[in-house]
Amino acid sequence: MNSFLDAVTTQTFMQNALWGSVLASIACGIIGPYVVVRKIGYLAGGIAHAVLGGMGAAYFLGRSPIGGALITAIGAALLIGWVSLREHRQEDIMISALWAVGMAAGILFISQTPGYNVDLMSYLFGNILMIPRRELYFIALLDIGIAVTVLLFFKQFLAVSFDQEFARLRGIRVELFSLLLLSLVALTVVILIQVVGLVLVIALLTLPAAIAGHYTSTLAKTMLLAILLGLVFTCSGLALSYQPDLPAGATIVLLAGCGYLFSSLGRKFHRP
Protein backbone atom coordinates (compact mmCIF):
# COMPACT_ATOMS: atom_id res chain seq x y z
CA MET A 1 0.00 0.00 0.00
CA ASN A 2 2.87 2.38 0.77
CA SER A 3 4.32 1.86 -2.70
CA PHE A 4 0.92 2.63 -4.22
CA LEU A 5 0.60 5.85 -2.21
CA ASP A 6 4.13 6.83 -3.21
CA ALA A 7 3.23 6.25 -6.85
CA VAL A 8 0.09 8.36 -6.52
CA THR A 9 2.05 11.30 -5.12
CA THR A 10 4.98 11.08 -7.54
CA GLN A 11 3.83 9.40 -10.78
CA THR A 12 1.70 11.28 -13.30
CA PHE A 13 0.31 8.10 -14.86
CA MET A 14 -1.09 6.96 -11.50
CA GLN A 15 -2.66 10.36 -10.87
CA ASN A 16 -4.30 10.18 -14.30
CA ALA A 17 -5.55 6.69 -13.49
CA LEU A 18 -7.16 7.89 -10.27
CA TRP A 19 -8.83 10.81 -12.01
CA GLY A 20 -10.04 8.42 -14.69
CA SER A 21 -11.51 6.20 -11.99
CA VAL A 22 -13.36 9.14 -10.45
CA LEU A 23 -14.78 10.32 -13.78
CA ALA A 24 -15.78 6.82 -14.85
CA SER A 25 -17.48 6.20 -11.50
CA ILE A 26 -19.57 9.33 -11.91
CA ALA A 27 -20.77 8.24 -15.35
CA CYS A 28 -21.58 4.66 -14.40
CA GLY A 29 -23.20 5.78 -11.15
CA ILE A 30 -25.59 8.07 -13.01
CA ILE A 31 -26.47 5.80 -15.93
CA GLY A 32 -26.04 2.38 -14.32
CA PRO A 33 -29.32 2.51 -12.35
CA TYR A 34 -31.26 3.12 -15.57
CA VAL A 35 -29.57 0.10 -17.16
CA VAL A 36 -30.46 -2.05 -14.15
CA VAL A 37 -34.05 -0.79 -13.85
CA ARG A 38 -34.77 -1.21 -17.57
CA LYS A 39 -32.90 -4.54 -17.69
CA ILE A 40 -30.90 -3.51 -20.75
CA GLY A 41 -27.51 -4.87 -19.74
CA TYR A 42 -27.44 -7.05 -22.86
CA LEU A 43 -28.22 -4.00 -24.99
CA ALA A 44 -25.35 -2.08 -23.40
CA GLY A 45 -23.11 -5.08 -24.10
CA GLY A 46 -24.12 -5.00 -27.75
CA ILE A 47 -23.22 -1.31 -27.96
CA ALA A 48 -19.88 -1.92 -26.21
CA HIS A 49 -18.81 -4.65 -28.61
CA ALA A 50 -20.15 -2.90 -31.70
CA VAL A 51 -17.86 0.06 -31.10
CA LEU A 52 -14.78 -2.07 -31.79
CA GLY A 53 -15.62 -1.74 -35.48
CA GLY A 54 -15.63 2.07 -35.25
CA MET A 55 -12.44 2.08 -33.20
CA GLY A 56 -10.70 -0.20 -35.68
CA ALA A 57 -11.82 1.94 -38.63
CA ALA A 58 -10.62 5.13 -36.93
CA TYR A 59 -7.28 3.56 -36.06
CA PHE A 60 -6.89 2.31 -39.65
CA LEU A 61 -7.54 5.83 -40.96
CA GLY A 62 -5.12 7.40 -38.51
CA ARG A 63 -7.83 8.99 -36.39
CA SER A 64 -8.59 8.82 -32.68
CA PRO A 65 -10.02 5.41 -31.71
CA ILE A 66 -12.18 7.08 -29.05
CA GLY A 67 -13.71 9.36 -31.69
CA GLY A 68 -14.60 6.30 -33.74
CA ALA A 69 -16.01 4.63 -30.63
CA LEU A 70 -18.19 7.65 -29.86
CA ILE A 71 -19.71 7.80 -33.34
CA THR A 72 -20.29 4.05 -33.51
CA ALA A 73 -21.75 3.86 -30.00
CA ILE A 74 -24.31 6.61 -30.66
CA GLY A 75 -25.22 5.06 -34.03
CA ALA A 76 -25.63 1.58 -32.52
CA ALA A 77 -27.72 2.92 -29.63
CA LEU A 78 -30.09 4.80 -31.94
CA LEU A 79 -30.43 1.83 -34.28
CA ILE A 80 -31.14 -0.63 -31.46
CA GLY A 81 -33.55 1.81 -29.83
CA TRP A 82 -35.43 2.40 -33.07
CA VAL A 83 -35.79 -1.35 -33.69
CA SER A 84 -36.85 -1.93 -30.08
CA LEU A 85 -39.59 0.71 -30.31
CA ARG A 86 -40.87 -0.49 -33.70
CA GLU A 87 -40.22 -4.24 -33.69
CA HIS A 88 -39.66 -5.37 -30.11
CA ARG A 89 -39.36 -9.05 -31.10
CA GLN A 90 -36.41 -8.23 -33.36
CA GLU A 91 -34.43 -6.43 -30.64
CA ASP A 92 -32.34 -9.43 -29.58
CA ILE A 93 -31.50 -10.25 -33.19
CA MET A 94 -30.37 -6.68 -33.87
CA ILE A 95 -28.21 -6.58 -30.75
CA SER A 96 -26.60 -9.92 -31.58
CA ALA A 97 -25.95 -8.81 -35.17
CA LEU A 98 -24.34 -5.52 -34.13
CA TRP A 99 -22.30 -7.34 -31.48
CA ALA A 100 -20.90 -9.84 -33.99
CA VAL A 101 -20.49 -7.46 -36.93
CA GLY A 102 -18.79 -4.80 -34.80
CA MET A 103 -16.28 -7.27 -33.40
CA ALA A 104 -15.61 -8.80 -36.80
CA ALA A 105 -15.16 -5.41 -38.48
CA GLY A 106 -12.83 -4.29 -35.72
CA ILE A 107 -10.67 -7.38 -36.08
CA LEU A 108 -10.47 -6.92 -39.85
CA PHE A 109 -9.38 -3.29 -39.51
CA ILE A 110 -6.84 -4.27 -36.86
CA SER A 111 -5.37 -6.92 -39.12
CA GLN A 112 -4.94 -4.39 -41.94
CA THR A 113 -3.36 -1.66 -39.81
CA PRO A 114 0.44 -1.67 -40.04
CA GLY A 115 2.40 -2.26 -36.85
CA TYR A 116 1.53 -3.80 -33.51
CA ASN A 117 -1.76 -2.30 -32.33
CA VAL A 118 -1.10 -2.36 -28.61
CA ASP A 119 -3.19 0.78 -28.04
CA LEU A 120 -6.28 -0.74 -29.64
CA MET A 121 -5.84 -3.95 -27.68
CA SER A 122 -5.77 -1.92 -24.48
CA TYR A 123 -9.26 -0.64 -25.34
CA LEU A 124 -10.41 -4.24 -25.76
CA PHE A 125 -9.15 -5.41 -22.36
CA GLY A 126 -8.71 -2.09 -20.57
CA ASN A 127 -5.60 -0.24 -19.43
CA ILE A 128 -6.49 2.53 -17.04
CA LEU A 129 -2.82 3.15 -16.26
CA MET A 130 -2.29 4.38 -19.81
CA ILE A 131 -4.97 7.11 -19.86
CA PRO A 132 -3.33 10.36 -21.09
CA ARG A 133 -4.28 13.72 -19.60
CA ARG A 134 -6.03 14.86 -22.81
CA GLU A 135 -8.41 11.87 -22.57
CA LEU A 136 -9.32 12.91 -19.04
CA TYR A 137 -10.56 16.25 -20.37
CA PHE A 138 -12.65 14.39 -22.95
CA ILE A 139 -14.13 12.09 -20.30
CA ALA A 140 -14.87 15.08 -18.05
CA LEU A 141 -16.81 16.77 -20.87
CA LEU A 142 -18.83 13.60 -21.45
CA ASP A 143 -19.52 13.37 -17.71
CA ILE A 144 -20.78 16.95 -17.65
CA GLY A 145 -23.00 16.31 -20.66
CA ILE A 146 -24.46 13.16 -19.08
CA ALA A 147 -25.04 14.83 -15.69
CA VAL A 148 -26.68 17.94 -17.16
CA THR A 149 -28.96 15.90 -19.44
CA VAL A 150 -30.10 13.62 -16.62
CA LEU A 151 -30.68 16.62 -14.35
CA LEU A 152 -32.80 18.39 -16.99
CA PHE A 153 -34.90 15.35 -17.89
CA PHE A 154 -34.83 13.32 -14.69
CA LYS A 155 -38.62 12.98 -14.41
CA GLN A 156 -38.99 11.99 -18.06
CA PHE A 157 -36.27 9.35 -17.81
CA LEU A 158 -37.83 8.06 -14.59
CA ALA A 159 -41.22 7.71 -16.26
CA VAL A 160 -39.99 5.90 -19.38
CA SER A 161 -37.83 3.58 -17.27
CA PHE A 162 -40.59 2.35 -14.98
CA ASP A 163 -43.88 2.67 -16.92
CA GLN A 164 -43.90 3.74 -20.56
CA GLU A 165 -47.68 3.52 -20.90
CA PHE A 166 -48.16 5.85 -17.93
CA ALA A 167 -45.55 8.16 -19.44
CA ARG A 168 -47.52 8.32 -22.69
CA LEU A 169 -50.68 9.15 -20.78
CA ARG A 170 -48.84 12.03 -19.12
CA GLY A 171 -47.88 13.38 -22.54
CA ILE A 172 -44.21 12.42 -22.37
CA ARG A 173 -42.59 11.66 -25.73
CA VAL A 174 -41.53 8.12 -24.87
CA GLU A 175 -39.69 7.42 -28.13
CA LEU A 176 -37.60 10.59 -27.89
CA PHE A 177 -36.55 10.11 -24.29
CA SER A 178 -35.94 6.39 -24.73
CA LEU A 179 -33.52 7.10 -27.58
CA LEU A 180 -31.90 9.92 -25.61
CA LEU A 181 -31.40 7.61 -22.64
CA LEU A 182 -29.83 4.96 -24.86
CA SER A 183 -27.51 7.62 -26.26
CA LEU A 184 -26.39 8.40 -22.71
CA VAL A 185 -25.73 4.69 -22.17
CA ALA A 186 -23.59 4.77 -25.32
CA LEU A 187 -21.59 7.75 -24.00
CA THR A 188 -21.04 5.94 -20.71
CA VAL A 189 -19.83 2.85 -22.55
CA VAL A 190 -17.24 4.99 -24.36
CA ILE A 191 -16.04 6.34 -21.00
CA LEU A 192 -15.79 2.92 -19.38
CA ILE A 193 -13.94 1.41 -22.33
CA GLN A 194 -10.87 3.35 -21.25
CA VAL A 195 -11.09 1.99 -17.69
CA VAL A 196 -11.93 -1.70 -18.00
CA GLY A 197 -12.13 -2.30 -21.78
CA LEU A 198 -14.89 -3.57 -24.01
CA VAL A 199 -14.84 -7.07 -22.53
CA LEU A 200 -15.51 -5.96 -18.95
CA VAL A 201 -17.48 -2.75 -19.48
CA ILE A 202 -20.90 -4.16 -18.54
CA ALA A 203 -19.77 -5.21 -15.07
CA LEU A 204 -18.74 -1.71 -14.00
CA LEU A 205 -21.85 -0.24 -15.59
CA THR A 206 -24.28 -2.54 -13.79
CA LEU A 207 -22.75 -4.01 -10.62
CA PRO A 208 -22.37 -0.81 -8.52
CA ALA A 209 -25.92 0.20 -9.48
CA ALA A 210 -27.27 -3.27 -8.67
CA ILE A 211 -25.60 -3.24 -5.24
CA ALA A 212 -26.88 0.27 -4.55
CA GLY A 213 -30.39 -0.87 -5.43
CA HIS A 214 -30.26 -3.32 -2.51
CA TYR A 215 -30.11 -0.47 0.02
CA THR A 216 -31.96 2.49 -1.52
CA SER A 217 -35.59 3.20 -2.30
CA THR A 218 -35.31 6.04 -4.83
CA LEU A 219 -33.46 6.38 -8.11
CA ALA A 220 -31.60 9.51 -7.00
CA LYS A 221 -30.24 7.78 -3.88
CA THR A 222 -29.30 4.76 -5.99
CA MET A 223 -27.27 7.01 -8.27
CA LEU A 224 -25.39 8.62 -5.39
CA LEU A 225 -24.58 5.29 -3.75
CA ALA A 226 -23.60 3.76 -7.10
CA ILE A 227 -21.13 6.61 -7.68
CA LEU A 228 -19.61 6.01 -4.23
CA LEU A 229 -19.38 2.26 -4.81
CA GLY A 230 -17.81 2.82 -8.20
CA LEU A 231 -15.15 4.98 -6.56
CA VAL A 232 -14.49 2.31 -3.93
CA PHE A 233 -14.15 -0.48 -6.49
CA THR A 234 -12.00 1.43 -8.98
CA CYS A 235 -9.63 2.98 -6.43
CA SER A 236 -9.35 -0.26 -4.44
CA GLY A 237 -8.73 -2.19 -7.64
CA LEU A 238 -5.93 0.17 -8.58
CA ALA A 239 -4.35 -0.16 -5.15
CA LEU A 240 -4.57 -3.95 -5.03
CA SER A 241 -3.27 -4.45 -8.57
CA TYR A 242 -0.30 -2.08 -8.32
CA GLN A 243 2.21 -4.02 -6.20
CA PRO A 244 1.73 -7.50 -7.80
CA ASP A 245 1.41 -5.89 -11.26
CA LEU A 246 -2.04 -7.35 -11.96
CA PRO A 247 -4.36 -6.08 -14.74
CA ALA A 248 -6.13 -3.13 -13.11
CA GLY A 249 -9.37 -3.43 -15.10
CA ALA A 250 -9.84 -7.10 -14.28
CA THR A 251 -9.07 -6.47 -10.60
CA ILE A 252 -11.65 -3.67 -10.46
CA VAL A 253 -14.37 -5.84 -11.96
CA LEU A 254 -13.48 -8.80 -9.73
CA LEU A 255 -13.92 -6.59 -6.68
CA ALA A 256 -17.26 -5.32 -8.00
CA GLY A 257 -18.40 -8.88 -8.67
CA CYS A 258 -17.43 -10.02 -5.17
CA GLY A 259 -19.19 -6.98 -3.72
CA TYR A 260 -22.38 -7.86 -5.56
CA LEU A 261 -22.16 -11.50 -4.48
CA PHE A 262 -21.68 -10.64 -0.80
CA SER A 263 -24.43 -8.03 -0.93
CA SER A 264 -26.87 -10.49 -2.49
CA LEU A 265 -26.01 -13.23 0.03
CA GLY A 266 -26.28 -10.76 2.91
CA ARG A 267 -29.76 -9.71 1.81
CA LYS A 268 -30.81 -13.33 1.47
CA PHE A 269 -29.64 -14.41 4.93
CA HIS A 270 -30.80 -11.28 6.75
CA ARG A 271 -34.21 -11.12 5.12
CA PRO A 272 -36.91 -11.34 7.82
Image: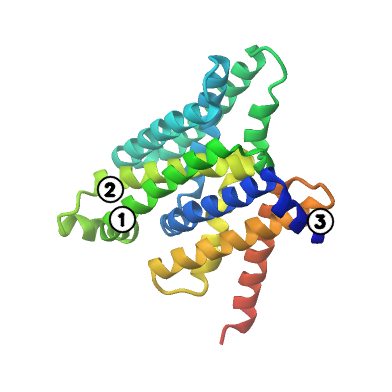
Q: Residues within 10 Å of mark 2 (few under 14, many from 20)?
A: some
x then y, percent, for residue 9: 70, 54
Vertical placement of residue 198 versus 115, above or below: below
User: What number is the disc on residue 3?
Assistant: 3
- Which residue is at 40% across, 37% downward? 77
Q: Residue furthest right?
A: 244
Q: Which element carries disc 3, helix, strand or loop? A: helix
- Closer to the camera, 181 or 26? 26
Tag 1: residue type? Phe
- Which residue is at 60% across, 38% downward? 198
Q: Earlier in the sequence, mark 3 or mark 2?
A: 3
- Which residue is at 16% across, 58% downward? 169
* CB within 8 Å, label 3 to label 2: no
Q: Residues within 10 Å of mark 3 (few under 14, many from 20)?
A: few
For label 2, the residue is 177
Q: Quadrant of residue 179?
A: top left
* CB within 8 Å, label 2 to label 1: yes
- The answer to whether 154 appears left or right of 254 in the picture is left
Residue 251 in sight in this render: no
- The answer to whether 6 appears left or right of 256 in the picture is right
For label 1, the residue is 157
User: How many angstroms separate mark 3 from mark 2 (CA)?
Assistant: 47 Å
x then y, percent, for residue 66: 52, 31
